[in-house]
Amino acid sequence: MAYDVNGTTVEHDEEGYITNLSEWSRELADIIAAAEEVEMGEEHWAVVNFLRDYYEEYQIAPAVRVLIKSIKKSMGPEVGNNKYMYELFPYGPAKQACKIAGLPKPTGCV
Amino acid sequence: MSETIKKFLYVNRKAPYGTIYAQESLEVVLIGAAFDQDVSLAFLDDGVFQLTKGQDTKEIGLKNFSATYRALGDYEVTKLYVEKESLEERGLTLDDLQNIEYEDEDDDYAEKSSIRLISRAEMAEVMADQDVVLSF
């Protein structure tokens, strides 16, 4: 299974998480988001960028409650709350945003 | 919070990359942290090497997961007991370990060290005080 980014194939697993994290690009993120039926706006990107920074620093994708707590701290309570985060990513802010961010499934999400 | 909070201690005794134990322990801690229990980690014997700074795994083709210990504070795991004798026997001091900090919500989010250096005798007391001890 693979995504097609301008003619280049990017392998992914059965749930849609990419296999080789270094193959991520913004174009790929848009393609994954489209497959997830998520229209990427400014706040979606902010969450995706936050996740990528978090992974870069700690080598894990945070669990959803850690993500929401951290977003609340960095972006304020209007964005960093359960309701809004689920509006941005209806199938789970951690799972879905991590997939779009090209990260593995979050640690602590079953 | 429920009133049935139990004290869980994860005991880490092995060097980080020779076996899968260290990484599995960390993974279980992160997953278990979702259950609102009182979680502590203990590092003794070769387990103290798990917390050393400057780890480089390029040559062995394994993921360097040492940075993940610094995320434990986000998961409200803030007690990392390190046994003094184990460090000394390996020629290590606290300076050889990473800075692992958490933000104390009850103290204006002050950053505090999660690492607690204790003696072998104190470690025995910490273990005796637990409801559940998991060894890795």
Image: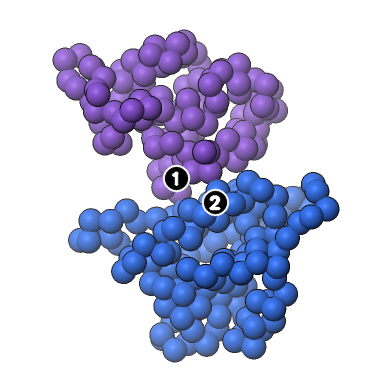
Identify the residue at horizontal 64%, vertical 83% (top origin).
B124
Q: Is residue B89 above or below residue A5?
A: below
Give the class, few, some or many, for how many residues have Cα within 10 Å of label 1's Cα (few <14, many ≥20). many
Pick the residue in front: B77 or B9.
Answer: B9
Pick the quarter of the image with the N terminus of chain A.
top left
Chain letter corresponding to the colour blue = B
Residue at x 64% of width, y 88% of height: B121
Same chain under badges 1 and 2? The reply is no
Left or right, B122 with respect to A108, comes to: right
Q: Secondary structure at mark 1?
A: loop
Q: Disc 2 marks which residue?
A: B30
Residue found at the very far left of the displayed protein: A7
In the figure, the shade used to draw chain A is purple
Asked if A66 appears above or below A37 in the picture, the reply is below
The residue at the point 30 percent across, 25 percent down is A25
* Display coloring: by chain
Question: Residue A90, position in %: x, y?
Answer: 56, 18
Q: Which residue is mark 1?
A: A60
Asked if one can make out residue A75 in the rendered structure from this viewpoint, the answer is yes
| Residue B117 drawn at (x, y percent) | 60, 77
> Of helix, strand and loop, which one carries label 2?
helix
